[in-house]
Amino acid sequence: MKKILITGCFGFIGSHWTSTLLKNKNYKITGIDIKDKPKNFVKNKNFTFKKISIFENKKLENLIKKNDFIFHFAAIPTPDTYINDPIKILDITAFQAVHIVKLCVKYNKIIYFTSTSEIYGKNPDVPYKENSSRVLGSTDIDRWCYSTSKALVEHYIKAYSKHNGLKYIIFRLFNIYGPNLNGRVLDKFIDKALSNKTLTINGKGTQTRCFLEVDDCMNAFYKIFSNKKLLNNTFNIGTNKQTTIINLAKKIIKLTNSKSKIKFKSYKKLSKLGYEDMFLRVPDPSYLISKTKWKPKVSLDDGLKRMILSIKDTNKK
Ligand SMILES: NC(=O)c1ccc[n+]([C@@H]2O[C@H](COP(=O)([O-])OP(=O)(O)OC[C@H]3O[C@@H](n4cnc5c(N)ncnc54)[C@H](O)[C@@H]3O)[C@@H](O)[C@H]2O)c1
């Protein structure tokens, strides 16, 4: 039996990954989170939940010692928090993650770390390859604290791998969406559309993002996880199909039969709040494709329909 620890197991990525792994009876999973939200897999005999914060160092160390693979997902990846509480972001995304990396080195465990497309900042030269440059704004702009935190952890992982033999995988995720997403543009738009409230767009909405459905992301994770030869690699996980934010808003309004209107928030106002937007963010997933033959299968329309149904279901409860 392979023993796996998942931090942030009740979050968006954590819950989908736990469900994916539990389909294979050879994995014994321990999940930790500060949330106490029951999910289907809680009753699975191969899953144990412990309500532990990653800041509880003793308990965390014990768990890392007992497991073989550490999937570190716990974070606060919501753009609103980058601006409203950057210290919280730095503490959890950078410093506690570095602590986890060091424990993996100490006990010789394999770490799987979720990094982000934000790593590339506002580099205009798209699509991004894994070795593309990072182009960031000033430290006066709080939003870069998340990108910088993830990059710091990546540096630690790569340095420990080079000098101490740490085994790792870094997933750089590009706008993953699906049921259970929380605090990002897609779930916010769907929530608003379902209650006929105004959807607010930053700038004119001509900025684009590449959205990848969570099942396609889990498929990429699984292909990477099941091939040990791929260890010590960084992978962009995303699709290069771009969607403008205005088109996304219109699509959601249409798919939900909503009467919502669209409002535009000026970038001038946003920059005073410590925000800076990227006009486009496009991954080059060719490395992942060449190594795993991965192919995304879910169209944005189908993915949105699934997500809308799931949010409607949750709202009924
Ligand atoms: N979803 C995406 O598109 C995306 C993109 C880039 C990177 N990521 C990364 O993927 C990971 C998972 O993101 P997500 O979208 O599932 O976010 P999420 O907010 O849905 O999940 C994070 C989970 O961590 C838990 N958590 C927070 N603080 C904790 C603590 N102190 N101790 C234990 N658990 C704690 C939360 O309760 C939550 O369940 C994060 O590291 C994030 O930076 C996600």
Image (spheres, grey):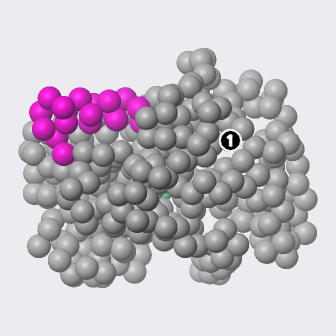
Give the camera-side residue of 253 and 175: 175
Task: Give the position of the N terminus as an image quadrant.
Answer: bottom left
Q: Disc 1 marks which residue?
A: 280
Is residue 8 visible in the rendered image? The answer is no
Magenta residue span: 149-168
Label 1 CB, ligand 1: below 8 Å?
Answer: no
Residue that appears at 84% across and 34% down: 266
Counting from the top left corner in percent of width and height, residue 85 is at 54, 33
Residue that appears at 34% across and 35% down: 154
Q: Is residue 306 left or right of residue 231?
A: right
Q: Main secondary structure of the magenta part?
A: helix
Is residue 283 on the magenta stretch? no
Q: Is residue 307 above or below residue 127?
A: below
Residue that appears at 58% across and 73% down: 298
Instruction: Answer with the quarter of the image where residue 292 lies.
Output: bottom left
Q: Is residue 94 left or right of residue 117?
A: left
Counting from the top left corner in percent of width and height, residue 132 is at 49, 33
Pointer 1 local density, CA inside 10 Å: few below 14, some 14–19, many at least 20: some
Counting from the top left corner in percent of width and height, residue 255 is at 79, 74
Instruction: Answer with the quarter of the image where residue 253 lies.
Output: bottom right
Q: Is residue 91 left or right of residue 123?
A: left
Which residue is outermost to the front? 290
Identify residue type, mark 1: Leu
Residue that appears at 36% across and 45% down: 234
Q: Secondary structure at mark 1?
A: loop
Task: Give the position of the C terminus as an image quadrant.
Answer: bottom right
Is residue 317 visible in the rendered image? The answer is yes
Q: Is residue 54 left or right of residue 278?
A: left
Counting from the top left corner in percent of width and height, residue 28 is at 18, 71
